[in-house]
Image: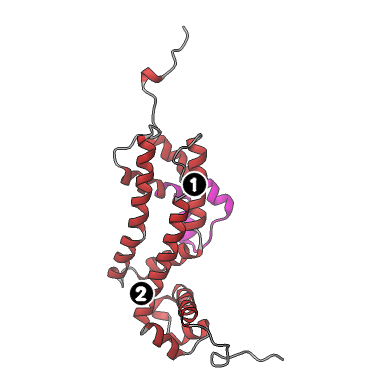
Amino acid sequence: MKATASADTLPPRGHNAKRTSIVEAAAAVFCREGFAGANIDLIAAEAGVSRQTVYNHHGDKEKLFAAVVRDLTERSNAGVFATLGTFPDRPADLEAELTAFAVRLNRNCICNREGKFLRKLIQAESERCPGLFADWREQGPGRTLSALAARFARLAHAGLVTLDDPDLAARQFLALIGADLQLTFLLGGTPSEDEVVRASANGVRSFLRAFARRPARSDRAAVPS
């Protein structure tokens, strides 16, 4: 029978690789056990390192938790901004292209591992760590909403939507495309691809009912008598 390697007999890893593995293991443990239920020994075992290695890299459990939130936020932002780069600035079919964008945003940024872990941590620990999650709000959603609002402002400038407040439009767009996924998230599930597509389409349809440009009377073709 093949023996299982202990943390002390595993091949040596570089400083950055160890640090990354500790943060990833800690994210999984904090999400599964909660902050109170997690401990350094459990995180060390999951990361395949010694207890002392965790302390050497991150200090105590509180600092490690902060590192997890920071790492998840940075990874989530990378996915969000990559997806924002596919926003339909000059759409030939506004509803179809905005729906495809919403599907990508939901799939790549809301339903992925980072999105799932952040939701669980925020729901479970935001009251205990209000300052930490205030930083997350500024660095995560704050940056995302500003970037998305700028893109909707360009659509308004092109005459495709009518907006008084691009920031409000960005918030409502995100709320609408995720509305049909909330129950699945609340129950701890991961939406299926069909659910993501349907939620995205429903959200975009509702968004455009509120914000799509309505042609002025002078723009409408005359109806033959």
Q: Residue furthest right?
A: 1
Question: Can residue 189 be found in the magenta stretch?
Answer: yes
Is 99 situated above or below 6? above
Q: Predominant secondary structure in magenta?
A: helix
Whole-percent x, y for residue 58 in the image: 38, 82
Q: Which residue has dot 1 on it?
A: 101
Q: Is 186 or 135 nearer to us in this picture? A: 135
Q: Residue at x 43, y 91 (%)?
A: 52
Position of residue 23 measured from the top left corner of the image (x, y, whole percent) = 45, 76
- State yes or no: residue 213 in magenta: no
> From what the image shows, is residue 184 above or below residue 130?
above
Image quarter of the N terminus: bottom right
Crowding at label 1, few (<14), some or many (≥20) Cα neighbours within 10 Å? many
- 2 or 1: tag closer to the N-terminus: 2
**Residue 220 versus residue 187 in the image, above or below:** above
Q: Residues within 10 Å of mark 2 (few under 14, many from 20)?
A: some
Instruction: Classify residue 7 as left or right of residue 219.
Output: right
**Secondary structure under the numbered disc 2 in the rendered image:** helix
Regarding mark 1 in the picture, which secondary structure is present there? helix
Which contiguous range is marked in magenta? Answer: 175-199
Q: Look at label 1 and name its amino acid.
A: Phe
Residue 127: x and y in percent read: 31, 69
The residue pinned by badge 2 equals: 66
